[in-house]
Image (tube, rainbow, N blue to C red):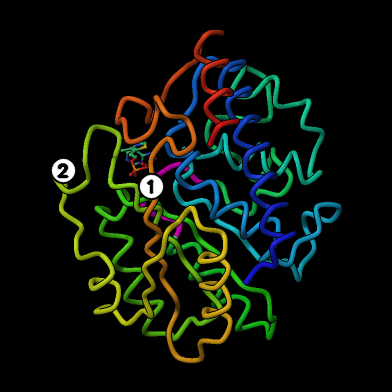
């Protein structure tokens, strides 16, 4: 549980970073902004409070590992890594431009702080399990955190990884589903029904928590539960809002990916300020 001062600080940080995501989306011409905003508090809570990391040593062996399985949310991840000092955030002016280290999906060989290259949906949970098993094999105490999208749970590989993680009691692995209920082309429940998603992961052997994915306290409480778990990996179904924080983007499939002109950028920034 955060104290009032910490909560205020993290909320202010989340707002400031949302503004930066808008700026980068404006300069680069378009990005997956809807999903960057739904995943946002999960990443902020992990990067600014929960994870053992050192931005000055991106390859530090004992760091916690992070996998953005929904790699298209890279614009949000990149802004956070820049803010933390993994690289000069000025570089983000060239986000997704030819010759820039930043593609729409972040490349671990080009962007310091990125542990795994992602973008092809359905792979992050298995990668996370591999990392977690690696820590166990080598007697290390670092933990692995995976953030998936709900749309990607239509991929069979997610369920193979889910089955294996429970089988191997990978308690050093924690995963989140950014449950914004919208995929690229409509509601998840009309494309490929996922509900009851918590019960499905539970049936696969996970300890499953359902939380408000924009509530920093609930996210950090879930991390504590995961750290204390001795039998099962923890899966958090984080109920979120696609486009969260910008009134004209919220719950709009059309804002899965989008570009902003000056007027839209200003309206988005004004909305974030009010949120
Ligand atoms: C294997 C694979 N198939 C298709 C895509 C193209 N794609 C990019 S985002 C997306 C769907 C995004 O919806 P969701 O997974 O729910 O993400 P979010 O709403 O969190 O942005 C798809 C199909 C991909 N990246 N990987």
The tally of labels here is 2
Q: Secondary structure at mark 2?
A: helix
The correct choice, above or below, for 12 with respect to 211 in the image is above
Q: Which residue is mark 2?
A: 191
Instruction: Tell me if residue 120 is in the magenta stretch.
Output: yes
Callout 1: CB less than 8 Å from ligand 1: yes
Mark 2: few/some/many CA within 10 Å (<14, 14-19, 20+): few
Residue 29: give x, y in percent of width and height: 53, 14
| Range drawn in magenta | 118-124
Who's the residue at 51% across and 82% down the image? 171
Q: Nearer the viewer, residue 11 or 163?
A: 11
Answer left or right for 36 relative to 59. left
Q: Nearer the viewer, residue 166 or 8?
A: 8
Can you tell which quarter of the image residue 81 is in?
Answer: top right
- Quarter of the image with the N terminus in it: bottom right
Who's the residue at 79% across and 44% down the image? 86
- The secondary structure that most of the magenta stretch takes on is loop
Who's the residue at 46% across and 51% down the image? 69
Q: Nearer the viewer, residue 76 or 159?
A: 76
Q: Which residue is mark 1?
A: 121
Q: Secondary structure at mark 1?
A: loop
Q: Residue furthest right?
A: 56
The correct choice, above or below, for 159 with respect to 270 in the image is below
Q: Earlier in the sequence, mark 2 or mark 1?
A: 1
Ligand 1, what quadrant? top left
């Amino acid at each position: 549980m955060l104290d009032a001062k910490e909560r205020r600080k993290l909320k202010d940080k989340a707002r400031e970073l949302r503004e930066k995501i808008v700026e980068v989306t404006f300069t680069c011409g378009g990005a997956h902004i809807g999903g960057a905003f739904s995943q946002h508090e999960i990443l902020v809570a992990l990067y600014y409070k929960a994870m053992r990391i050192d931005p000055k040593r991106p390859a530090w062996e004992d760091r916690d590992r992070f996998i953005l399985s929904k790699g298209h949310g890279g614009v949000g991840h990149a802004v956070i890594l820049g803010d933390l000092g993994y690289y000069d955030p000025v570089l983000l002016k060239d986000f997704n431009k030819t010759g820039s280290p930043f593609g729409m999906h972040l490349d671990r060989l080009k962007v310091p702080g990125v542990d795994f290259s992602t973008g092809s949906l359905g792979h992050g949970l298995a990668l996370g399990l591999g990392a977690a098993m690696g820590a166990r094999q080598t007697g290390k105490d670092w933990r692995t955190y995976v953030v998936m999208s709900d749309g990607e749970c239509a991929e069979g590989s997610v369920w193979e990884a889910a089955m294996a993680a429970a089988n191997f009691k990978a308690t050093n692995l924690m995963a989140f589903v950014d449950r914004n209920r919208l995929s690229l082309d409509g509601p998840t429940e009309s494309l490929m029904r996922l509900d009851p998603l918590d019960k499905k992961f539970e049936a696969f052997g996970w300890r499953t928590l359902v939380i408000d994915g924009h509530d920093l306290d609930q996210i950090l409480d879930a991390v504590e539960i995961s750290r204390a778990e001795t039998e099962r990996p923890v899966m958090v179904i984080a109920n979120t809002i696609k486009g969260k924080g910008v009134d004209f983007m919220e719950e709009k499939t059309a804002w899965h990916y989008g570009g902003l002109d000056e007027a839209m950028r200003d309206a988005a920034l004004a909305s974030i300020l009010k949120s």
